[in-house]
Image (cartoon, coloured by chain):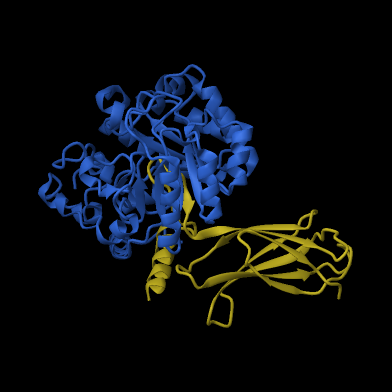
Chain colours: A yellow, B blue
């Protein structure tokens, strides 16, 4: 139950601080947001190797053994087909994971209509995804 | 969110948090003092750093072993903070960074900015730096005086411009506030805004290292009250303009003051969530702690074992009960405040923030 106590601690600390940022900045140290666990850069391309802009990328955090993801952060691919996000968590321990649901929300404006695609984060901080047409 | 919680309830919640953190003592943040070598010779240096290193320092191979041990022994691993001295002066920094990167550890750095050129920053970024702090101790004259160098200010500002352009996930500027800087805080804030600095921490120089013998550097009680008051008065206004200002983590403050000057209700996390390995291998809870708080040496002790089984002076703080703090009504909340203020004597802290805010 250590992980549960850690979640409560983070939530209470955040509440007392008036925000969700949980930062340690020791004297003569540098700030570290310990709810922040890394970054994820997702490069999205078509089968013809063309970057796809304007895609909705929902970053999901889930814990193994639970059906529904319990946090969601939305970013969009830029003109180079790149979506970048910082990953935050209220879970301490080893069992949380991140996934991204990539959705084409603008029909043909970004060069085509592409299938919804779900990917898991298994590389350290960067993933490349090839989308299939609908 | 809960800015309006009654003070007594907030203090009770903070005590619960602190006790839970002490019990859990998850290592979140680990200083690696890579070297005491420095390219400046600042008047206030708490570590007595110079361009030459008198005492023996850990070798690069030793640091690589330390980093591998940390990566294997802690899950999740702590955030590593490379400090010094000036960490950019370490002759084998790239090798150390490659090791950190290979283990997938998150890390940051504290620098005076003097050696932070574009190529140097590119190396840090390519090795995944997550956070950097640059020191800027006032306007040009004040900064150069404290840093003992005619071009220190220009070099620090140049480094800040480079970091601002690099769009790192987290970074800030720190200022060691000495009496001459008190009157220029507004001007420094404007300068930092012009440089697109997102966050600024203010320190009171504490009497360690060279600062111990230079009383002119230290803020007295009234000056410290002015510094805290300045942060409290300007914080909201500067926040709206894009600069998050806060007091450093030093010193316990009542919640009513705390919430006006810091983003996170703080207590001294040294030895609870923060550890340090000094350049000679000393294991302790933070940098600049007195010898009494040294727990071992990485050359002969297992850090993970020490972290789990020792550090009682940081976590239980029984020594406070026999100090001058014992009769203070604030002791149950303050518990002696910041560990680094307890030197050289264990009878009195060097500075008491409760005194700044009136009798307990």
Q: Is residue B311 left or right of residue B58?
A: left
Position in image of residue B18 (x %, y %): 30, 60
Q: Residue A97 lies in what quarter of the image?
A: bottom right
Outermost front residue: B61
Position in image of residue B247 (x %, y %): 39, 42
Please state which of residues A111 and B179 is positioned toward the viewer in this rendering. A111
- Residue A87 appears in the figure: yes
Q: Residue at x 86, y 72 (%)?
A: A133
Q: Residue B185 lies in what quarter of the image?
A: top left
Does residue B241 sit above or below B320 in this rendering? above
- Residue B130 appears in the figure: no
Query: How many marks can you see?
Result: 0
Does residue A121 sit above or below B149 in this rendering? below
Please state which of residues B228 and B103 is positioned toward the viewer in this rendering. B103
Q: Is residue A111 left or right of residue B220?
A: right
Q: Residue at x 31, y 39 (%)?
A: B288
Please state which of residues B79 and B123 is positioned toward the viewer in this rendering. B123
Position in image of residue A103 (x %, y %): 76, 70
Outermost top residue: B150
Please state which of residues B139 and B62 is positioned toward the viewer in this rendering. B62
Q: Residue B356 lies in what quarter of the image?
A: top left
Q: Is residue B354 left or right of residue B103?
A: left
Position in image of residue B6 (x %, y %): 33, 61
């Amino acid at each position: 139950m250590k992980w549960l106590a850690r979640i409560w601690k983070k939530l209470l600390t955040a509440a007392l601080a008036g925000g969700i940022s949980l930062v340690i900045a020791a004297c003569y140290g540098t700030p570290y947001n310990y709810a922040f666990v890394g970054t994820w850069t997702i490069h999205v391309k078509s089968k013809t190797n063309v970057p796809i802009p304007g895609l909705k990328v929902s970053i999901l955090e889930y814990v193994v053994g639970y059906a529904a993801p319990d946090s969601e952060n939305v970013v969009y691919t830029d003109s180079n087909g790149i979506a970048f996000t910082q990953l935050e968590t209220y879970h301490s321990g080893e069992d949380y994971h991140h996934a991204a649901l990539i959705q084409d929300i603008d029909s043909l404006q970004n060069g085509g209509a592409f299938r919804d695609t779900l990917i898991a984060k298994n590389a350290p901080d960067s993933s490349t995804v090839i989308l299939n047409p609908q | 969110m809960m800015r309006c919680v009654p003070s007594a309830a907030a203090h009770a919640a903070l005590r619960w948090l602190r006790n839970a953190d002490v019990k859990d003592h998850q290592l979140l943040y680990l200083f690696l003092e890579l070297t005491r070598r420095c390219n400046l010779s600042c008047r206030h240096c708490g570590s007595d750093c110079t361009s030459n290193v008198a005492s023996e320092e850990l070798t690069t191979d030793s640091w690589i072993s330390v980093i591998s041990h940390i990566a294997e022994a802690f899950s999740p691993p702590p955030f590593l903070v490379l400090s010094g001295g000036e960490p950019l002066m370490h002759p084998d920094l790239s090798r150390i960074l490659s090791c950190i990167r290979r283990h997938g550890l998150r890390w940051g750095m504290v620098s005076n900015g003097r050696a932070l050129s574009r190529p140097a920053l590119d190396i840090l970024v390519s090795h995944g730096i997550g956070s950097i702090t640059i020191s800027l101790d006032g306007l040009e004259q004040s900064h150069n005086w404290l840093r003992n160098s005619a071009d220190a200010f220009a070099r620090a500002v140049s480094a800040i411009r480079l970091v601002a352009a690099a769009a790192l996930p987290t970074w800030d500027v720190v200022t060691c506030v000495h009496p001459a800087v008190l009157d220029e805080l507004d001007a420094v804030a404007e300068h930092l805004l012009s440089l697109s600095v997102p966050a600024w921490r203010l320190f009171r120089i504490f009497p360690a290292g060279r600062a111990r013998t230079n009383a002119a550097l230290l803020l007295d009680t009234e000056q410290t009250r002015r510094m805290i008051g300045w942060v409290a008065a300007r914080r909201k206004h500067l926040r709206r303009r894009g600069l998050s200002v806060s007091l450093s983590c030093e010193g316990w403050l009542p919640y009513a003051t705390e919430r006006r000057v810091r983003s996170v209700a703080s207590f001294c996390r040294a030895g609870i969530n923060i550890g340090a390995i000094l350049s000679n291998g000393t294991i302790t809870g933070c940098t600049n702690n007195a010898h009494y708080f040294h727990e071992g040496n990485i050359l002969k002790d297992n850090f993970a074992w020490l972290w789990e089984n020792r550090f009682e002076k940081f976590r239980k703080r029984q020594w406070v009960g026999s100090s001058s703090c014992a009769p203070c009504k604030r002791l149950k909340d303050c518990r002696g405040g910041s560990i680094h203020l307890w030197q050289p004597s264990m009878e009195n802290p060097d500075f008491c923030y409760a005194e700044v805010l009136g009798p307990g």
